[in-house]
Amino acid sequence: DAGVIQSPRHEVTEMGQEVTLRCKPISGHDYLFWYRQTMMRGLELLIYFNNNVPIDDSGMPEDRFSAKMPNASFSTLKIQPSEPRDSAVYFCASSFERGGSDTQYFGPGTRLTVL
Amino acid sequence: DAKTTQPTSMDCAEGRAANLPCNHSTISGNEYVYWYRQIHSQGPQYIIHGLKNNETNEMASLIITEDRKSSTLILPHATLRDTAVYYCILYNFNKFYFGSGTKLNVKP
């Protein structure tokens, strides 16, 4: 398996623009997670899905952020409008539920820079 | 929300065992102890996890104390490529809370 795939790997945009990050989870995994990593706050869970349904979005910073999972093999994280403080590395992870012990496998991340 | 305490950094000589401690005194009965590492600019990489018993795989060993309030990750023969930030995480109900981790510096 190719592992979790994220695109783009790097994104540079200007403040106010819409940004869309993409993730393809490992085939067969039924959980998908979006994380954000910054120097100040470390790794933070933003939202996670189970069987394409959002379960917990309490980590989403504000309404400018939205995430969707239209099918089992694709998810997007959208920021509209983007701001310089959104600059971070965004990771997607997936896992397969085994009942209490569910290892998450992370993608390589998307490094977002908002100017 | 991180419920683990780790030293900020540690040094280890190449070829020697690296022992990374973690305190999790508030662990509950159904929380697993997970270890991940993050090599610069890469996504976190799974290492090992356990509930009560000690565990070993091809990468490392995990020693959990009998009261489960602390654990130690052991890399038996550290190499330069093991230089990374190591995270000790308590896992329950699908959520990982990553703390600050331990920066392990493996030196020649």
Image: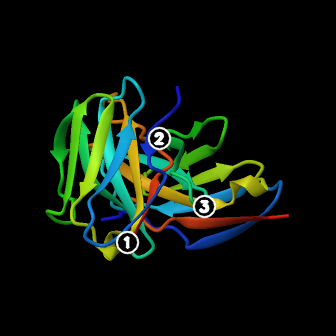
Reply above or below: B105 against A102. Answer: below
The image quarter in which residue B15 lies? bottom right
> Residue B33 at what x, y percent from top left?
44, 48
Q: CA distance from mark 2 to mark 3?
A: 25 Å
**Residue at the (39%, 35%) spot, across then down:** A24
Tag 1 secondary structure:
loop
Q: Classify residue B99 by image quadrant.
A: bottom left
**Element type where label 3 sits in the image:** loop
CA gap, disc 1 to disc 3?
16 Å
Q: Residues within 10 Å of mark 2 (few under 14, many from 20)?
A: some
Residue B40 against residue A22 in the figure, above or below: below
Are callouts 1 and 2 both on one chain?
A: no
Q: Secondary structure at mark 2?
A: strand
Judge whether residue B31 can be spotted in this image.
no
The quarter of the rendered structure image containing the C terminus of chain A is: bottom left
Q: Nearer the viewer, mark 2 or mark 3?
A: 3
Contact between marks 1 and 2 (CB within 8 A): the answer is no
Q: Nearer the viewer, mark 1 or mark 2?
A: 1
Disc 3 residue type (three-letter)? His
Q: Is residue B6 left or right of residue B30?
A: right
Q: What's under tag 2, amino acid-wise?
A: Gly
Q: Which mark is residue A41?
A: 1
Instruction: Say which residue appears at 32% left-offset and 69% top-offset.
Output: A86
Give neighbour class at mark 3: few <14, some 14-19, many 20+ (Cα, 10 Å). few
Vertical position of residue B102 compared to residue A35: above or below: below
Chain letter for mark 3, please: B
Q: Position of residue B89 (x, y in %)?
A: 42, 54
Q: Which residue is mark 3?
A: B40
Name the disc covering residue B50, or none. Answer: 2
Q: Residue at x 57, y 59 (%)?
A: B41
* Residue found at x 52% / y 25%: A1
